[in-house]
Amino acid sequence: MKIHLMIFAKIVPMTKTYESVIRPVVGDMIHDPGFHAKFHNGYEVAKVTLDYSADECWVSLAPSVIELEEIPVEGYLAHLESHGWRAVSQEDGGISG
């Protein structure tokens, strides 16, 4: 199943897709090398939307604390992108979940 993780770094929604047989549940803490300790101290699964017809799972992540912002948001976005995250465009479908 494709697992699409979604975070909202300021006003820029970011996504990264994994292939996994493990489905996240609300309350799980997610680790990713793109997350930067000087911006957030972790992300928690806030919402899970399953699309069995497409074999996809959309996961909304929420920061586990208020943004630390010890680095500028632009630096954080660049760090995420260097680890496989991408900005969500309006052409991306299925992100209504």
Image (spheres, rainbow, N blue to C red):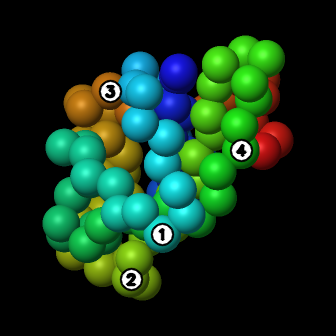
- Alpha-carbon distance for marks 4 and 2? 23 Å
- Badge nearest the viewer, 1 or 2: 1
Residue in the picture at 30% in, 79% down: 68
Residue 46 % position (x, y) = 58, 65
The answer to whether the residue labelled 3 contacts the one labelled 1, judged by CB atoms less than 8 Å apart, is no
**Mark 1 closeness class: few <14, some 14–19, many ≥20 residues within 10 Å:** few
Give the amino acid type for the residue marked by disc 4 in the picture. Thr
**Mark 2 closeness class: few <14, some 14–19, many ≥20 residues within 10 Å:** few
- Alpha-carbon distance for marks 4 and 1? 14 Å
Give the amino acid type for the residue marked by disc 3 in the picture. Gly
Sequence order check: which comes first, mark 3 or mark 1?
1
Using the image as rendered, state which of residue 37 and residue 24 is in the foreground.
24
The answer to whether the residue labelled 4 contacts the one labelled 2, judged by CB atoms less than 8 Å apart, is no
Residue in the picture at 38% in, 82% down: 65
- Badge nearest the viewer, 3 or 4: 4
> In the figure, 32 relative to 88: above or below?
below
Give the numbered dot on residue 27: 1
**Is 75 left or right of 44, judged from the image as shown?**
left
**Mark 4 closeness class: few <14, some 14–19, many ≥20 residues within 10 Å:** some
For disc 3, the marked residue is: 84
Looking at this view, name the residue that lies furthest to the top: 54
**Mark 3 closeness class: few <14, some 14–19, many ≥20 residues within 10 Å:** few
Element at badge 3?
Answer: loop
Residue 53 % position (x, y) = 79, 17
Residue in the picture at 53% in, 21% down: 1
Q: Is residue 11 visible?
A: no
Give the amino acid type for the residue marked by disc 1 in the picture. Gly
For disc 4, the marked residue is: 49
